[in-house]
Image (cartoon, rainbow, N blue to C red):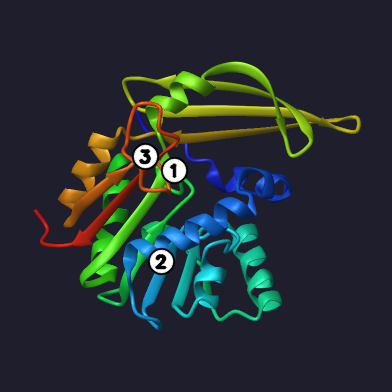
Amino acid sequence: MALLENWQQFFEEDYLSVEDHILPKTRTDLEVEQIIKRFQLPLGARILDLGCGTGRLSIPLSQAGFQVVGIDGAPILINAAKAANEQAGAAVEFIHQDMRELDREEEFDAVINFGTAFGYCAHEWEDQDILRRVWRALRPGGQFLMDYENRELRIQSAFGKRWEKLGGKLVYVHREFDCATGHWMEKLSWLEGADRKKKVLHQRFYATTEMIRMCRHAGLHVQEVYGDIDFSRLEVNSPRVLIWAKRGEVE
């Protein structure tokens, strides 16, 4: 059964208003530091931020001395990224583009995909094709670093119905997970004045074994798998999954 694709309706103004609470600057600073540490690239190397959002990683990486291109399919996020880029005096090339349309060939020394910016396509084969496009965009030996939520922990800790505080707002959250398809559905509702607002997000949460296999089939040879940005060991209760891979031969 195909995933209901609605991410463009989710990543709008309401998301921008809470992004700093979901992705605080302390987290961003640590991620930038660890990305640089993991890649060990010379200054001037070209990095693609795939699913760059508002540019929270692209801009500091550019300021650190790398040539950065940021791609995102959500218009409001890429516009926010361009505004932040100008305000920071950075030199990121931000492009509004769906990941499925990525068409670069041996151009980048590294590609990052952070913040669970994967799994929003209607069909699994589209996600597989995105990884194949990452392979093609990398130069020989180029590196890929991917970060997403640990499915095992997410299901244990966030499943069901509950009230949560998000950006100073009390939000009613209803989450469901289909074990057969990996389909995660998240409904959010809250009050703004007298108005009741709603958001629904559909996403495919891949098991780590699935992601490793998909990377391998795309020609991205996995070097290490971590359980957080500190490069700790992946365990059931790890908050994140980080996959570090290098471009190799397609299987």
Give the secondary structure at mark 2.
helix
Q: CA distance from mark 3 to mark 2?
A: 18 Å
Is residue 98 in sight in this rendering? no
Q: Amino acid at mark 3?
A: Gly
Give the secondary structure at mark 3.
loop
The image position of residue 234, as x and y in percent, is 32, 36
Q: Nearer the viewer, residue 242 or 71?
A: 242
Q: Would residue 219 appear left or right of 235 to someone viewing this image?
A: left
Which picture quadrant has residue 177?
top left
Q: Residue at x 36, y 39 (%)?
A: 227
Q: Would residue 151 appear left or right of 59 to someone viewing this image?
A: left
Tag 3 near tag 2, CB within 8 Å: no
Q: Nearer the viewer, mark 2 or mark 1?
A: 2
Is residue 223 in sight in this rendering? yes
Q: Amino acid at mark 2?
A: Ile
Which picture quadrant has residue 175?
top right
Estimate how packed mark 2 is, as few (under 14), some (14 to 19) or many (20 or more) residues with alpha carbons within 10 Å: some
Estimate how packed mark 1 is, as few (under 14), some (14 to 19) or many (20 or more) residues with alpha carbons within 10 Å: many
Sequence-earlier tag: 3 or 2: 2
Q: Nearer the viewer, residue 56 or 17?
A: 56
Q: CA distance from mark 3 to mark 1?
A: 22 Å
- Reading the image, the residue beneath label 2 is 36
Sequence-earlier tag: 2 or 1: 2
Give the secondary structure at mark 1.
loop
The image position of residue 203, as x and y in percent, is 45, 36
Q: Which mark is residue 120?
A: 1
The image position of residue 61, as x and y in percent, is 50, 71
The image position of residue 91, as x and y in percent, is 55, 81
- Reading the image, the residue beneath label 3 is 227
Q: Amino acid at mark 1?
A: Tyr
